[in-house]
Image: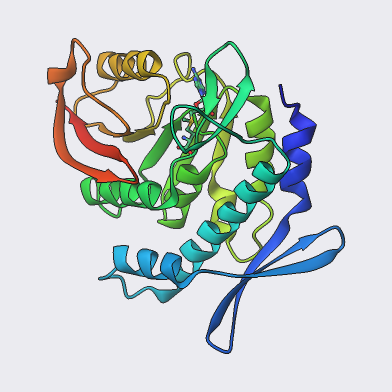
Amino acid sequence: MFGVDRVFGIVKQLSGFRLTESRGKLLLQWQKDGGILTREVERKTSDLIAGLLVNCSDKVLIQKLLLLCAAYDQIEKELLKAGVIASCEMGCNPVYDLDPGTGCLYVPTPFIAGLRSMLGIRDLVGANKEVEIADLGSGLGLPVFLSTLLGFCATGFELSPVLMKATRHIKTVFPDLPELGKANFIEADFFQADLSSFKAIYTFLWDNALREQAIEDLISRMPSGTVVCGYGMTNKSPNGSLLNLIRSESVSGRKISLCRRI
Ligand SMILES: C[S@@+](CC[C@H](N)C(=O)[O-])C[C@H]1O[C@@H](n2cnc3c(N)ncnc32)[C@H](O)[C@@H]1O
C-alpha cells in the first residue's frame, strides 16, 4: 500500500516543467531538490503529436501537448524508480496497486491514445468550449488535462485520495500551461456522482466487470446524444444496443471506442 504522501512527495519534487529548444534539440527542464534537471525529448514523440494534429496550424498547442507528454513521461519514470509503480503480470503496462485486494488499479491511458480519444470527442461535440467532459476514474489526470488543452471544461472523478492529491498538485506545476488550471478533480465514486452537466464521458477502467457496470450505468442515466468514449471498452452490456458505435481504432494495444447514446 502506498500512502498519499509517498506519491504526492514524488510528484511534488518535480515542478516547474518547461520545454526549451537548443541547437535543434528539444529539452525538458524541471526543478528537483533545489536544482534544475534537463532531459532531451525524443523527436519520435514530437513527430507523433505533430502527426496527429497534421491539419493543425496551432504550433503553440503542439508545443503545449509535447510539454505535457514529456513531463508525464518523466513523472512516470520517477514513480517507477521509487517503486510506486509496479509491473503487472497482465502485460507490460505500469500499474499502481493503490489498495491491494480492492481491485482499485490505476493504469494510465498512454498519451497518444488519450490525445486520439479527446480529438475523437472533439470531432463529435464540435469546438464548443462550453461542453463539459468527464473522466470516470481519472487516475493521475492526463485525459482531463488533455481536454483542457483542447479548450474544454473537464472534470475527473477519482476514488483514490493519493491520485487526487497528486492531480491537484500537477495543475499548478506547469507555468507554461495555464489551461491545466481549468481542470476540476472531484474525489468521489463516479457511480454516485451527478453527471447531468456532461455532454461527453471518457473512461478507461482496467477491471472488466467494473467497466461493464460503468457502461450499463451510463446507458441507464445519460440522455440521448451523450458521447461516450471508452478506452479498452468491449461492448458486452445487455443494453449495449443503446450505444451507437461511431468509430473504433486500436492505439497502443487497445481499442478506443467512440460512441453516442441513442
Ligand atoms: C485504469 S485507471 C485510468 C486512469 C485515467 N482515466 C487514465 O486513463 O489515465 C482507472 C482509475 O479509476 C479509478 N476508479 C475505479 N473505480 C472508481 C469509482 N467507482 N469511482 C471513481 N474512481 C474509480 C481507479 O482508482 C483508477 O485510478
Identity of the residue drawn at 76% across and 26% down: 3
Q: Position of residue 227 (x, y in %)?
A: 26, 35
231 w.r.t. 193: above or below: below
Picture quarter with the N terminus = top right
Q: Residue furthest front?
A: 89
Give the quadrant of residue 82. top right
Q: Residue furthest right?
A: 34
Q: Position of residue 71 (x, y in %)?
A: 59, 58
Picture quarter with the C terminus = top left
Identity of the residue drawn at 57% across and 52% down: 72
Q: Is residue 44 left or right of residue 241?
A: right
Q: Position of residue 42 (x, y in %)?
A: 50, 69
Identity of the residue drawn at 50% across and 48% down: 145
Q: Position of residue 136 (x, y in %)?
A: 44, 28
- Colour scheme employed for the rendering of this structure: rainbow
Q: Residue furthest bottom?
A: 23
69 w.r.t. 7: above or below: below
Q: Is residue 201 left or right of residue 172?
A: left
52 w.r.t. 159: above or below: below
Identity of the residue drawn at 59% across and 11% down: 101
Q: Is residue 77 visible?
A: yes
Give the quadrant of residue 57. bottom left
Q: Is residue 157 left or right of residue 233?
A: right
Q: Nearer the viewer, residue 100 or 88?
A: 88
Number of numbered callouts drawn? 0
Q: Is residue 171 visible?
A: no
Q: Nearer the viewer, residue 57 or 231?
A: 231
